[in-house]
Image (cartoon, rainbow, N blue to C red):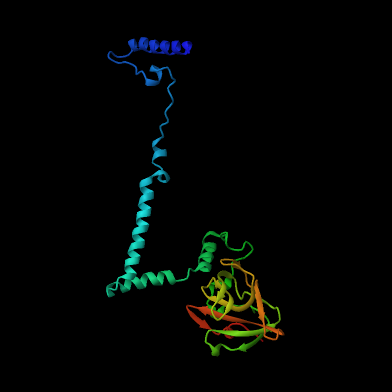
Amino acid sequence: MKDRRKEIRNRIAKRKKMSGTRPSGFTPPIYDEEKYGFERLPAYEGTPSDLDHPLFKKEVFYFKILAALCLFLITAVLFKHPSEKLDAARNFVSNTMETEMQFAAISNWYEETFGKPIAFLPPDTGKSEQAEKTIANTEYALPASGRIMEPFEVNGEGIMIETGLGSKVEAVNEGIVIFAGVKEQLGKTVIIQHYDKSESWYGGLERVDVLLYDPVSKGKSIGTVAPSEDASKGSFYLAIKKDDIFIDPNKVISFE
């Protein structure tokens, strides 16, 4: 301990000697650590670039939270206030939230612009020329061999197709799955959004073999048909939608 104190005294004396070579009136600082016999701990001072990084600014983080909260409160007031003057704003918000994202169209645009599809597209799916044509000229694949047991005129939205027991249902064209689950009156259903922004609906399935946002190619199996009451045959529902209007699948797909 004595040697340690002696070393510190020598260091202080050395500084005093060096002060003779510096301007008059300048005295080297003696830190409290040295005064009481301890080593001075090095202090870390971050560079301006480190301290100014946006991820470490609490003000920016708090501002984002405040902005999100204000947006939430404004939306809540917008829908709770009975004023008719706010109808236009309410309709705009409602339409924006209810509009389906055109995943397939965006994916196709990405492929055209950058050349290679992004991760959620199938790596072996080539660019389809049919995806750029209108629905009238689109070549749809037959989803399953069978006959039409309920025509389009019955409900104006889709048709019922009778098939063999346990038949697989295949995608009529390439696209992305935007719904895979249970729909009221249709049962287990798969909805595929195609690159021309049309949709194909497959309902009344026994089993669904795809997941939400799965990319599918034309002819890919997406599920199996449900059995009939006597378990001798199978059936499923098919609908095609374009610009929010259902069209007769029998006009674009040959079931003969």
Q: At x 43% / y 13%, what residue is drawn? A: 8
The x and y percentages for residue 145 are 68, 82
Residue 83 lies left or right of residue 249; in this view the side is left
Q: At x 60% / y 81%, what residue is drawn? A: 237
The x and y percentages for residue 34 are 40, 18
**Which quarter of the figure has residue 96?**
bottom left
* Relative to 5, residue 135 above or below: below
* Relative to 26, residue 50 above or below: below
Quarter occupied by the C terminus: bottom right
The x and y percentages for residue 232 are 72, 85
* Relative to 145, residue 48 above or below: above
**Which quarter of the figure has residue 150?**
bottom right
Residue 205 lies left or right of residue 61; in this view the side is right
Instruction: Identify which residue, 203 or 252, lies in the foreground.
Output: 203
Instruction: Identify which residue, 202 or 38, lies in the foreground.
Output: 38
Q: At x 42% / y 22%, what residue is drawn? A: 40
The x and y percentages for residue 244 are 47, 78
